[in-house]
Image (cartoon, rainbow, N blue to C red):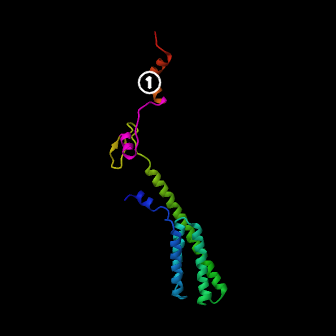
Amino acid sequence: MTLTSRLREAGPPPPGFAAYLLGATALLVLADAVAGPDVRFPIFYTLPVLVAAWLGASVWAGVYAVALPLVRVAFDLGVWRSEPSIALAAVNAAIRVFVLALIAALAWAAGAYVRSLRRQVVMLEGILPICSHCRRIRAEDGVWQPLEEYISARMPAQFSRGLCTHCLKKYYGEELQRIESGPSR
């Protein structure tokens, strides 16, 4: 499998991917709730933020970066009562939001760069190596084929022969002038 085919396969997420990501995030929150206040499970909150940002869903990444720390604050203050004060819980939440937003921004930038490279690779794959003299094209297997043969093998195309006005003047200029001026006596 070539790099280009791998890149094409790694295209945009399938339809419904947001629902899968939301479900996985819900499982992470549930695991955090079950683990209790002493287990520092929120480190895994970076995963949905990373995935959403990497795939270019910056809005989802931002929502996760804000919502997940707030869920942890709700657990700390409401369910477990593990934070000594609301102010301390707010400071911890702000730190988590900042870190997750930073991770989202970095992952989004890296994902955008990879998507840009993917477009360039696909575009460069479309460039045909062609001989500047005989106009043969080098196929994937390295064999040089005539232009018509190469194109006909890959798409339903038929060719006709003719001369463009540039070549007509370049190669048959004198004869063309003689024909246009009429018969000489």
Q: Nearer the viewer, residue 40 or 61?
A: 61
Rendered image quadrant of residue 137: top left
Examine the rendered structure and indicate whether residue 27 appears above or below residue 142. Answer: below
**Residue 174 coordinates in the image, percent (x, y):** 46, 20
Neighbour tally class for label 1: few under 14, some 14-19, many 20 plus, Cα within 10 Å = few
Which residue is tagged 1? 172
User: Tag 1's secondary structure?
Assistant: helix
Residue 131's place in the image compared with 52, above or below, is: above
Looking at the picture, how far across and down is residue 52, in whole percent?
54, 69
Instruction: Tell me if I can see residue 2 in this picture.
Output: yes
Is 140 left or right of 78, judged from the image as shown? left
Residue type, numbered disc 1? Tyr
The answer to whether one can see residue 43 in this image is no
Start-end of magenta stretch: 146-165
Please name the residue shown 46% across and 27% down the image.
168
Q: Nearer the viewer, residue 111 or 151?
A: 151
